[in-house]
Image (tube, rainbow, N blue to C red):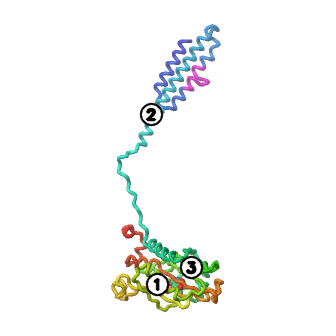
Amino acid sequence: MKDKLESILSNAMTQIEASVELDKLNDIRVAFLGKKGELTSVLKSMKDVAPEERPKVGQLVNEARNRIETKLEEKKAVFERKIREEKMKAEVIDVTLPGRKMEIGHRHPNTITLEEVEKIFIGMGYEVVEGPEVEYDYYNFEALNIPENHPAKDEQDTFYVNDKIVLRTQTSSVQVHVMEEGKLPIRMISPGRVFRSDDVDATHSPSFHQIEGLVIDKNVTFADLKGTLEQFAKQLFGEKTKVKFRPHHFPFTEPSAEMDVTCFKCGGKGCRFCKGEGWIEILGCGMVHPHVFEMSGINPEEYTGFAFGVGLERIALLKYEIDDMRLLYENDKRFLSQF
Ligand code: DAH
């Protein structure tokens, strides 16, 4: 019996020593110490041992069990250490490697220009309001006094989603939403994307940006419009800038005008930049038409107001002396990184 135990023990030790992976250790434990294991079967055969010998044999079996357990634990620790070392080696970080440089982006000229315009108007007490780009025909045209047969409504100019819904062609549509809300007085600008079915060239794009302005209060006059827009032009293009209003027509304002500024390059003398004119047109404006008031439920006898619309790209092109609008949309990093 003793020899048998010795042989089991040495066999177990050899197998443990020879094992090459953690999983194998478990198989060995089962083979020797498990319910049907070799050592367990020795215990089961105790009944064949003479009674006086039993304590002795029992002790030997226990000793053998302990030695196998200990050996298994030792070997397990060896494997675990090896696994940990391999993991550490795989995860090692070479702190001497040079870092990867993060490229810092640039704000788009449109964004810089818009922020500047917003700052000017916020400084004059205006709110910045946004409206939907997909718009009912009603807000884009009808409520702005643009009649059914107006050329702007032609499919050549307007993207129609269906016969009632369009991609807005002008941010003037936001005026109507703000007026409908009925909170008076109003002093707001509304920047945003607009869409027209134009082909792309140096001065056209099917999608560009406008900034709409609207002021409604009691006793607002054309003098307020002129003063406000002159102040805007001076802050945007410099103190020396002069403005000029030319009569124009917009269905939603009466009277209407376009505003020119003196060329900030030549100061008004005429140069290549202003095509010898000395003046550059920058926006459309006018006094809110009584029909527009009535349609939005504001009494034109009680309130008056002015509105204006500026092309954002147009201002950005002027300010940064960019001569092709396409540059603003191509997102060439060599171009954008100059701002
Ligand atoms: N919506 C006009 C356009 O797209 C610009 C404009 C002109 C807006 C006069 C106005 C305005 O609010 O009063 O050409």
Of pointers 3 and 2, the one earlier in the residue sequence: 2
Q: CA distance from mark 1 to mark 3?
A: 17 Å
Ligand 1 neighbours mark 2 (CB distance < 8 Å): no
Q: Residue at x 63, y 11 (%)?
A: 48
- For the residue pair 157 and 35, the one nearer the viewer reads as 157
Q: Amino acid at mark 3?
A: Arg
Q: Which mark is residue 82?
A: 2
Residue 144 location, quadrant: bottom right
Q: Crowding at label 1, few (<14), some or many (≥20) Cα neighbours within 10 Å?
A: many
Residue 152 in sight in this render: yes
Is residue 33 left or right of 247 when viewed as pictured?
Answer: right
> Residue 316 in the image: x percent, y percent?
42, 76
For the record, the magenta segment spans 29-40
Q: Which tag, 1 or 3, sits closer to the chain's start?
A: 3
Task: Give the residue drawn at x 44%, y 89%.
Answer: 244
Q: Nearer the viewer, mark 3 or mark 2?
A: 3
Magenta span has 14?
Answer: no
- Residue that badge 3 annotates: 187
Q: Earlier in the sequence, mark 2 or mark 1?
A: 2
Is label 1 in a helix, a strand or a loop?
A: helix
Q: Do the residues bearing badges 1 and 3 touch, measured as CB atoms within 8 Å?
A: no
Q: Amino acid at mark 2?
A: Lys
Q: Secondary structure at mark 2?
A: helix
Q: CA distance from mark 2 to mark 1?
A: 79 Å
In the drawing, what numbered circle is on residue 230? 1
Residue 280 appearing in the image? no
Q: Nearer the viewer, mark 2 or mark 1?
A: 1
